[in-house]
Amino acid sequence: MRSSNPVFSRRGFSRDNGHAGFNAAPQAGGPAVGTNPYATNPYAPQQGAPLGGPQAPARTDVMTIDDVVTRTGMTLGTVVLTAVLSWVLLPVDSANLGKSYGIAIGAALVAMVLSLIQSFKRKPTPALILAYAAFEGVFLGVISSAVSTYIAQGVVIQAVMGTMAVFAGVLFAYKMRWIRVTRRFYGFVMAAAMGFVLLMVANLLFSVFGGGDGLGFRSGGLGIIFGIVGIVLGACFLALDFKQVEDGVAYGAPREESWLAAFGLTLTLVWIYLEMLRLLSILQGND
C-alpha cells in the first residue's frame, strides 16, 4: 500500500512484500520479522537477539522525531521567508500586476518540476527540497498578496491560523489514536483524492474553453463544499504522513529520510493552506 503523499508513495518507511504499508504500530519488542525495510541497516532495531549476546552497534545515524522537526522547520521556514519577501518585493497592484502574476506562475511551475524530481529520486537531496520550498514560497506570497488586495483583506492571516489549527488538531487526534490509519482508511482517502482531482481538472478545462467558472466548483455553494472537502482531504494526508514518520522512527530509518518527511509534510501543509485560502475567500466574498 502506498501513501497519498507523492514523497512517500515511492519510498514508504514501512513495507510489506515490497509495497509501502500502513501496518499496525510496532510492538515494544520491535517490528515483526519481514516488515522492516531497513533490516540490513546495522543501526535498525534488532529482534530476537540472545540475552547476554553481542550487542548491536550504537544507533548513531537513524531518524528521530527531532530530526523531522528540525528539517520540517527549515523547509517551512524557507517557504515563509520567500513568501514574505515576494509579498514585499512583488506588489500586486495595477502597475505590477502582470509582472507579479508572471513570476508567480513561473515559480509554481519550477516548484512543481522540482517536487516531481525529488519524488522520483531514490534518496533525498536537501538542496533540491529547499529550492522547491523557495519557489513555492514565491508563488504563495504573490497569490496571497493578490487575494488580500483584491478579494478579502486579512484573509491570509485567517488561512494561516486555520492551517495551523488543522495541523494541531490532526496531530492531537492521531496521538490520541482517534485517527487510525488502516488499509480501509488509505483506500477511502485515495479514492476521494482521485475523484477530487479529476473534478478540479474538469472544472479547469471547462473554464479555459468555456469561460467563466467552468462547472462552478471554485465559487458559490459548490465552491464552499469543495473547499471543505479539500481541507478534509489535506487533514487525511496529514494522518498518512504522521503514520509514515512514526514507522520511520520505529523501524530505524536512516537520518537522511527525515528530509523526505519534511518535504512530504510541507507539500501537505501547502495544500491545506491553499484550500483554506480559497474557502475563506469565497465565504468573505459572499458577505
Image: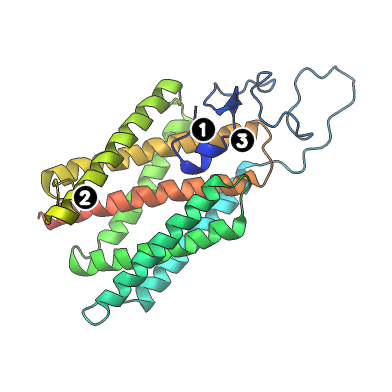
Choose the circle earlier in sequence order: 1 or 2. Answer: 2
The correct choice, above or below, for 247 with respect to 269 in the image is above
Q: Tell me the crowding category of disc 1: few under 14, some 14 to 19, or many 20 or more residues within 10 angstroms, Cα based.
A: many
Q: Quadrant of the C terminus?
A: bottom left
Q: x, y (%) of residue 11? A: 57, 38
Query: What amino acid does circle 2 point to?
Result: Leu
Q: Residue at x 77, y 38 (%)?
A: 59
Task: State the residue position of label 1.
Answer: 243
Q: Secondary structure at mark 2?
A: helix
Please name whichever residue, 262 or 12, is drawn nearer the observer in this view of the structure. Answer: 12
Choose the circle earlier in sequence order: 1 or 3. Answer: 1
Q: CA distance from mark 1 to mark 3?
A: 9 Å
Q: Tell me the crowding category of disc 3: few under 14, some 14 to 19, or many 20 or more residues within 10 angstroms, Cα based.
A: many
Choose the circle earlier in sequence order: 3 or 2. Answer: 2
Image marks 3 and 2: residues in contact by CB distance under 8 Å:
no
Query: What amino acid does circle 3 point to?
Result: Gly
Q: Secondary structure at mark 1?
A: helix
Q: Is residue 253 left or right of residue 100?
A: right
Task: State the residue position of label 2.
Answer: 205
Between label 1 and label 2, give the one nearer the viewer.
2
Task: State the residue position of label 3.
Answer: 248
